[in-house]
Image (cartoon, grey):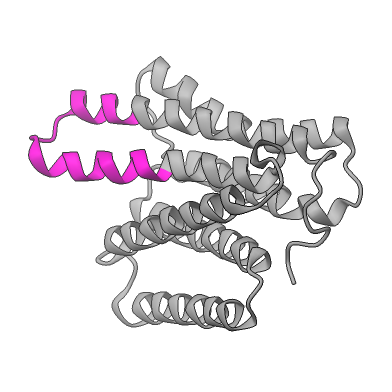
Amino acid sequence: MVKTGSSILFIFSLAAVLLPLFPLAMLFVRRPYPLQKVMPLVTLCLIAFFKQVLLLTVTSSPSIADFITAVFNMAEMTVLLLLLRSELRHAELRQGLSFLLIAVLSTVVTIYSLEGITDYAHPVEMFISCLILLISLFCIIIISNEEVFNLRSPLFWIAGGSFCYYAMFLLSEGLRNFEPLSNHTENERFILLASVYMVRYVFYIIAAYVSRESKQKEIFFQ
């Protein structure tokens, strides 16, 4: 997502680096206990932070940028899938998600090992983005069906933020096929995604804020 160019693009790029730190700062202020229950949010924010820092420093090498994007997108998908798995009550469904995670990770690693990153970076990114979108949607549905007030569930805000961003990302990728590429349209697309990216971290900040009062399971990764 990080690009260089005009000052406005640089500002959005810098914001993309700094925004993941705000939910972490909120968690530090709120000091939720036990800390295990907010580890998925901490992990997602750290993944996003290091991803944007690395992308900002290697923009001159597209192949390395593709590799960084692929690795960190798979890490984000893994965290969200484990988060969804921890909310399921049926052991068969949890086991099925474990098999799905292993299958996806092994398939992607095999493709990159045999075919390289450059040719398959974009299709794999689209596939993982679609999977993250579906995982986030299932998380929202599960929380909405529970008796607890879902707006006080950190999972609801985490999934909602991820859903908003990846829905807009996939929509923008689809629109690229219906209009000619130009620097102007690419800049507009970047600014739109950067704005939704900011909204995503507003959701994450709310997740950090409500984490102290949450009555969710104490340990998400189980």
Res 183 quadrant in image = top left
Give the x, y percent position of residue 161. 53, 39
Nearer to the camera, 206 or 198: 206
| Quadrant in which the N terminus appears | top left
- Position of 65 with respect to 171 (left or right) is right
- Position of 49 with respect to 176 (left or right) is right
Residue 179 located within the stretch drawn in magenta: yes
- 27 over 83 or under it: above or below: above
- Position of 22 with respect to 103 (left or right) is right
Residue depicted at 32% across the width and 73% down the height: 116
Residue 64 located within the stretch drawn in magenta: no
- Position of 89 with respect to 25 (left or right) is left
Give the x, y percent position of residue 123. 27, 62
Which stretch did the figure color magenta? 166-190
Residue 21 appears in the picture as rendered: no
Give the x, y percent position of residue 177. 12, 44
Residue depicted at 60% across the width and 33% down the height: 203
Res 28 quadrant in image = top right
